[in-house]
Image (cartoon, rainbow, N blue to C red):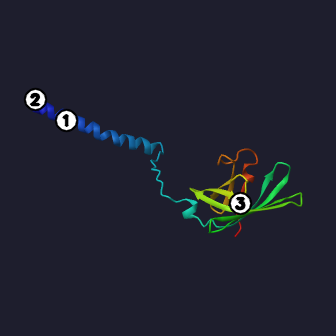
């Protein structure tokens, strides 16, 4: 009786131990790699040198574009200059910004609604009012590149 119990426990142990090996073997055969995602706290505000000057031409609803210069200062302030390409119209604005996990909120001096950007490596991508990336055929034109 003891011999049968010992054999039964031995078989259970062998089956239990071989299950993990089979999963690993199948994963390796199929080229699947296990990856643990860790929030290591590396965001634009602490990993990138995001202060500086960003330039680009953003799409305009009623013209060929808006030449945009965004100056991000290290004292949490910004200057935004917008020049309409086909007009003699220049708009200069300033205010303060906050940056959280790469998402920058520009709060203007005055009553203007906030603008949102995603700060990446040497670029600032304009976001919509819901802090989402702009979609559509012009989506790639909402990027300002760092020049200084």
Q: Secondary structure at mark 3?
A: loop
- Towards the viewer: 56 or 73: 73
Q: Which residue is mark 3?
A: 109
Q: Residue 30 at x, y = what percent?
A: 47, 42
Q: Nearer the viewer, mark 1 or mark 3?
A: 3
Quadrant hosting residue 55? bottom right
Q: Residue furthest top?
A: 1
Q: CA distance from mark 1 to mark 3?
A: 75 Å
Lower sequence index among marks 1 and 2:
2
On residue 23, which mark appears?
A: none
- Towards the viewer: 26 or 89: 89
Q: CA distance from mark 1 to mark 2?
A: 12 Å
- As drawn, is 67 to the left or to the right of 77? right
Q: Secondary structure at mark 2?
A: loop
Answer few, some or many: residues within 10 Å of disc 2's Cα (few below 14, many 20 plus, some between 14 and 19): few
Q: Which residue is mark 2?
A: 1
Q: Residue 10 at x, y = what percent?
A: 20, 37
Residue depicted at x 47% and y 45%: 32
Q: Residue 134 at x, y = what percent?
A: 70, 47
Q: CA distance from mark 3 to mark 2?
A: 86 Å
- As drawn, is 78 to the left or to the right of 28? right
Q: Secondary structure at mark 1?
A: helix
Residue depicted at x 82% and y 48%: 61
Q: Which residue is mark 1?
A: 9
Q: Residue furthest front?
A: 110
Quadrant hosting residue 95? bottom right
Image quadrant holding the N terminus, namely top left
Numbered disc total: 3
């Amino acid at each position: 009786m003891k011999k049968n119990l010992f054999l039964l426990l031995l078989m259970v142990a062998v089956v239990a131990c071989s299950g993990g090996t089979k999963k690993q073997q199948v994963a390796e055969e199929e080229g699947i790699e296990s990856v643990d995602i860790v929030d290591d706290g590396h965001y634009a505000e602490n990993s990138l040198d995001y202060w500086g000057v960003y330039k680009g031409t953003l799409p305009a609803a009623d013209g060929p574009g808006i030449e945009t210069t965004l100056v991000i200062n290290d004292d949490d302030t910004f200057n935004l200059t917008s020049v309409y390409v086909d007009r003699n119209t220049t708009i200069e604005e300033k205010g303060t910004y906050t940056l959280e996990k790469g998402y920058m909120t520009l709060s203007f001096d005055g009553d203007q609604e906030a603008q949102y950007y995603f700060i990446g490596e040497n670029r600032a991508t304009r976001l919509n009012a819901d802090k989402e990336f702009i979609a559509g055929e012009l989506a790639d034109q909402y990027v300002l590149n760092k020049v200084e």
